[in-house]
Image: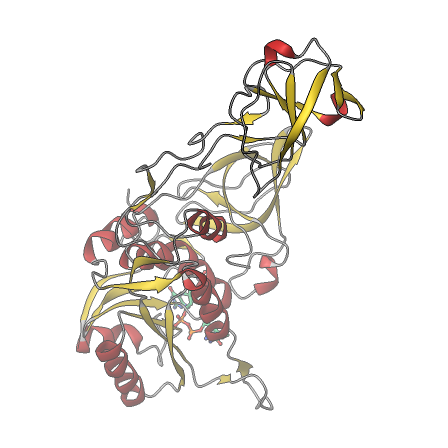
Amino acid sequence: MACCDEPQLIPVQDAIARMQVAVQAVTDTETVPLPELLDRVTAEPVHAGFNVPGYDNSAMDGYALRAQDAGQVLTLVGQSLAGHHFDGELNAGQCVRITTGATIPAGADAVVMQENTEVDGDSIRVMKAPAAGENIRRAGEDITQGQEVFPSCYRFGPVDIALLASLGLAEASVKRRLKVAVLSTGDELTPPGQPLKDGHIYDSNRYGLIAILQRLNVEVLDLGLIPDQPDQIRAAFERAGAEADAIISSGGVSVGDADYVKDILGELGEIGFWKVAIKPGKPFAFGHLGKAVFFGLPGNPVSSMVTLHQLALPILRTMAGEAPEPPLQLTAKAASGYKKRPGRQDFQRATLRCVDGENQIDSNGAQGSGVLTSFLGANAYAVLEAERGKVETGESVTVIPFDRFIT
Ligand SMILES: Nc1nc2c(c(=O)[nH]1)N[C@H]1C(S)=C(S)[C@@H](COP(=O)(O)OP(=O)(O)OC[C@H]3O[C@@H](n4cnc5c(N)ncnc54)[C@H](O)[C@@H]3O)O[C@H]1N2
Ligand code: MOO
């Protein structure tokens, strides 16, 4: 679909598709210990070496019994505690004290929770009879021996680390981490912590970009702040192209007199495409330089964050070896109006709420590409399709939720 006032702009989905096929996933693998596996990507499927749970066990603190005996007063003959099982076998009219997670004794087929009993020494009266099988967690009901628990190309989250540990695995085979070079360009930029010169602003993009990349668990090569000097930009790009898998630059990618990034990318490497029908972030550039994939993010602070999030991150995840997955999209009712002109797909920072069972999306106010505070408290993008114009309150809007991964 061509874009109205600037027909050369590439639709967002086409840009992502073109980048996905232009990159390769890392192939080197390494064995990494469990405490360091968060956000690493599996190199091979992970299988369970045994059943989980490993044995039939109790879901409640109470008494293990034979369900058919529950109508009579039962005789307590022993105990099965988590970690210390009952050695004997249950006979008719008998029960065994049992705690949550403890092994079901041989002969028992149900557990009554202790709140449903009356205890008088070794005599146990069952007030509410359990059905056969009640309160028993069966061996293998969660995971069966040999089952594939994690596929290949899977990124471990925090709960996955617990799951790996529950399988007794102290390490896993994963793909090597990506190395990503980051730099910002601009003569007007000053590093935080130093006094601001007249007409300067602080370099904020590089810090935000690196923080997002840290969440992706990549190795960051911080090339710092590069002035608008072609030779210095060339030197930084050459180093990044020799050392990194990906280069992320911020600024200097538009058409201004000191915007050298795209030209130097073309000179030292190859421009895949330039300019996407995205707002904010239109001058985004993609290409290759040395052995690295190149993402040229626009300098406007919101544009750099949105293009990293929406355009570069999916590709970095593919390069890290993950199977590509489209982002979760919802539909919500506009709780406020949205200014918009047809042309680019707009990613407005917004707040998604569920009000009386209905998804509502409220704009986070001023949406200029320099208004970084539009991200404050945001938990979603209101995604306004390229061809769409102004959105009135009450209209249906596509929403991409996000969490503190980005903010
Ligand atoms: N004649 C045109 N001018 C512009 C166009 C256009 O199509 N024609 N596109 C506009 C759009 S859209 C964007 S987005 C910007 C992107 O320009 P650059 O990538 O070249 O970015 P800069 O000019 O270097 O900076 C833009 C803006 O952002 C500030 N900035 C830059 N780097 C940082 C940083 N690391 N931390 C914080 N802020 C940064 C910079 O000071 C500028 O204010 O181009 C439009 N122009
Ligand atoms: O596409 Mo730009 O980020 O709007 O200023």
Q: Residue at x 62, y 59 (%)?
A: 376
Instruction: Find residue 142 and report its image quarter.
Output: top left
Residue 125 in the figure: left or right of residue 237: right
Location of residue 294 in the rendering, given as x and y in whole percent from the top left corner: 27, 68
Q: Residue at x 57, y 22 (%)?
A: 90
Colour scheme: secondary structure
Location of residue 4 in the rendering, given as x and y in whole percent from the top left corner: 34, 47
Residue 9 in the figure: left or right of residue 170: left
Location of residue 378 in the rendering, given as x and y in whole percent from the top left corner: 60, 52
Residue 350 in the figure: left or right of residue 176: right
**Does the rendering let one see residue 90?**
yes
Residue 288 in the figure: left or right of residue 381: left
Q: So how many labels did they put on this image?
A: 0
Question: Where is the C terminus found, in terms of image quarters?
Answer: bottom right
Above/below status of 113 relative to 42: above
Q: Residue at x 64, y 19 (%)?
A: 94
Viewer-closest of 97 and 135: 97
Question: Where is the N terminus found, in terms of image quarters?
Answer: top left
Q: Farthest residue toward the right?
A: 120
Instruction: Find residue 187 and report its image quarter.
Output: bottom left
Q: Residue at x 37, y 71 (%)?
A: 219
Viewer-closest of 27 and 45: 45
Above/below status of 101 relative to 307: above
Above/below status of 258 relative to 250: below
**Does the rendering let one see residue 284?**
no
Viewer-closest of 353 and 333: 353
Location of residue 122 in the rendering, given as x and y in whole percent from the top left corner: 75, 25
Q: Quadrant of ligand 2?
A: bottom left
